[in-house]
């Protein structure tokens, strides 16, 4: 039986120079999962060769050294990201670089989303702003 979603769902594409998937983000991602802030719905790695060839890899396709840090992260469902999604992410990469594509449910938002639905409301707009953009706006506003 599929997981019933009630929180907001996000897709993050995190690009890295080089073609090796280091596990440096795995502990931080694991903390988010372990604390109930997010639930991982899909996790796929994409790389773009120097010749422009795009390859996508599921966690099970990685060698033990690359996959190891991610193996303890609970929840990877797999299958949500389409070939078109993976190709689009790969096209955006520089040759010789790689990316992690992560789909997660914001489990922290479940209660709020349920309250909105139960009160007859509906979300009509939602956007994410990166920290640098907000910091620049805050700096400009205080100058």
Image (tube, rainbow, N blue to C red):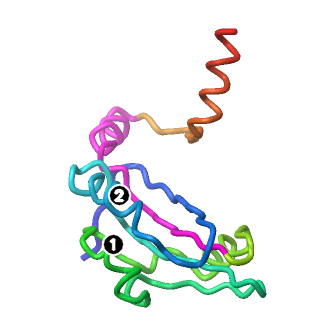
**Are the residues flagged by discs 2 and 1 in contact, CB closer than 8 Å?**
yes
Q: Position of residue 55 (x, y in %)?
A: 61, 86
Give, as a single range, the part of the protein colored magenta: 97-120
Mark 2 secondary-structure assignment: helix
Q: Residue furthest right?
A: 51
Q: Nearer the viewer, residue 83 or 58?
A: 58
135 left or right, relative to 58: right
Q: Quadrant of the N terminus?
A: bottom left
Which image quadrant for residue 73?
A: bottom left
Q: Is residue 41 above or below residue 124?
A: below
Q: Is residue 41 magenta?
A: no
Q: Is residue 33 above or below residue 18?
A: above
Q: Nearer the viewer, residue 136 or 9?
A: 136
Residue on which disc 1 sits: 70
Mark 1 secondary-structure assignment: helix
Q: Say which residue appears at 34% left-offset and 42% top-offset.
A: 109
Report how far apart the C-alphas of labels 2 and 1 lie in the structure: 9 Å
Q: Is residue 102 above or below residue 20?
A: above
Q: Say which residue appears at 44% left-offset and 55% top-offset.
A: 9
7 left or right, relative to 82: left
Q: Position of residue 61 (x, y in %)?
A: 43, 90
Residue on which disc 2 sits: 29
Q: Is residue 113 magenta?
A: yes
Q: Say which residue appears at 30% left-offset and 35% top-offset.
A: 115
Q: Say which residue appears at 57% left-offset and 70% top-offset.
A: 99
Q: Which mark is residue 92?
A: none
Q: Position of residue 135 (x, y in %)?
A: 60, 27
Q: Nearer the viewer, residue 33 or 67?
A: 67
């Amino acid at each position: 039986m599929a997981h019933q979603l009630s929180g907001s769902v996000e897709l993050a594409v995190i690009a890295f120079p080089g073609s090796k998937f280091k596990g440096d983000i795995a502990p931080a991602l694991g903390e988010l999962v372990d604390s109930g802030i997010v639930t991982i719905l899909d996790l796929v790695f994409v790389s773009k060769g120097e010749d422009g060839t795009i390859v996508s890899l599921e966690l099970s396709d990685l060698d033990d050294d690359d996959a190891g840090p991610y193996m303890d992260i609970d929840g990877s469902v797999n299958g949500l990201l389409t070939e078109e999604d993976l190709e689009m992410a790969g096209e955006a990469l520089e040759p010789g670089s790689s990316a992690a594509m992560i789909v997660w449910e914001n489990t922290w938002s479940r209660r709020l989303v349920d309250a909105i639905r139960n009160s007859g409301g509906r979300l009509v707009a939602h956007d994410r702003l990166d920290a640098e953009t907000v910091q620049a706006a805050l700096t400009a506003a205080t100058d």
